């Protein structure tokens, strides 16, 4: 059994009291002894849609109730159809912390510092084309539910996203990304898998996206799908 560690600090709101588990990287999920992930009694469910969850964690007066504020700014600016966050049988990747701002000061998102505008860090979503931001948000919505309960052991899922096929094979004029290689993701898919090892003493069997990013908090079950929360920049380009 792995050492006890903190797996969830602010994202879960009222359920954040369940912050310490043994051998488990997930909020409210299985206490794991091996890769078979023997079920435990902890409950990962929240009785609300992903859209309700986003709003509750975007408009508050404390850090805990503004962890998704920068992502909400992107949603509003891009004019993405917010009904997409209420539709069932989906996996939703939500941006928290370094990936979308650091409440309560709301520092610049990693998106702004990675997708540069005219070779400089952006300072606002409105420096990007609305379509660009909207399709990035669509990339973070996956068709089907993929979590620790549904992903088979030792299998990588090539999941379809809502992003138009091949949109991120190139970048708009004036927008650059370090080490960007064009035409790596012609179908705009996202790869999802559960690692069969622990990359550090603070994460057992994490969910990994596109073979590069380990999810910060995973397998939260909303009424309309699964939520994974990322804490750093996530590129829609697939690694070679």
Image (spheres, rainbow, N blue to C red):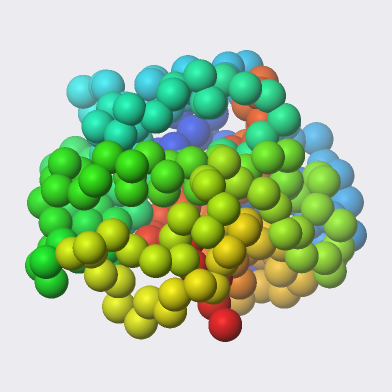
Residue under the point 49% across and 33% down: 12
- Tell me if residue 16 comes above or below residue 85 in the rendering: below
Residue under the point 37% across and 40% down: 134
Relative horizontal placement of residue 19, taking residue 109 as reference (left or right): right
Q: Which image quarter: residue 86?
A: top right
Relative horizontal placement of residue 145, taking residue 128 as reference (left or right): right
Nearer-the-camera pick, 93 or 237: 237
Q: Which image quarter: residue 228?
A: top right
Residue 105 image position (x, y, % from top left): 14, 43
Quadrant location, the N terminus = bottom right
Nearer-the-camera pick, 207 or 191: 191
- Tell me if residue 99 comes above or below residue 77 in the rendering: below
Residue 168 image position (x, y, % from top left): 44, 60
Residue under the point 51% across and 72% down: 183
Quadrant location, the C terminus = bottom right
Nearer-the-camera pick, 68 or 83: 83
- Tell me if residue 142 comes above or below residue 202 in the rendering: above
Relative horizontal placement of residue 114, taking residue 190 as reference (left or right): left
Relative horizontal placement of residue 128, taking residue 48 as reference (left or right): left
Residue 133 appears in the figure: yes
- Tell me if residue 112 comes above or below residue 137 in the rendering: below
Residue 235 image position (x, y, % from top left): 44, 64
Residue 71 image position (x, y, % from top left): 33, 38
Residue 69 appears in the figure: no
**Tally of numbered tags:** 0
Residue under the point 53% across and 26% down: 84
């Amino acid at each position: 059994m792995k050492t006890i560690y903190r797996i969830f600090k602010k994202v879960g709101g009222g359920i954040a009291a369940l912050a310490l588990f043994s051998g488990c990287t997930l909020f409210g999920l299985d206490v794991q002894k091996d890769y078979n992930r023997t079920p435990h009694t902890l409950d990962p469910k929240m009785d609300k849609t992903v859209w309700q969850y986003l709003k509750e964690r975007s408009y508050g007066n404390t850090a805990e109730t503004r962890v998704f504020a920068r992502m909400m700014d992107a949603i509003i600016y891009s004019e993405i159809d917010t009904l997409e966050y209420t539709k069932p049988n989906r996996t939703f990747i939500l941006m928290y912390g370094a990936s979308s701002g650091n409440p309560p000061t709301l520092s610049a998102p990693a998106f702004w510092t990675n997708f540069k505008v005219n070779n400089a860090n952006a300072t606002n979503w409105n420096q990007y084309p609305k379509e660009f931001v909207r399709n990035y948000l669509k990339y973070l919505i996956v068709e089907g539910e993929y979590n620790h309960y549904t992903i088979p052991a030792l299998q990588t899922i090539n999941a379809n996203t809502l992003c138009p096929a091949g949109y991120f094979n190139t970048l708009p004029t004036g927008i650059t990304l370090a080490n960007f290689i064009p035409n790596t993701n012609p179908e705009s898919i996202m790869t999802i898998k559960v690692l069969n090892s622990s990359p550090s003493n603070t994460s057992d069997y994490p969910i990994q996206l596109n073979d590069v990013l380990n999810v910060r908090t995973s397998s939260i079950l909303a009424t309309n799908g699964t939520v994974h929360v990322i804490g750093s920049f996530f590129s829609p380009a697939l690694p070679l």
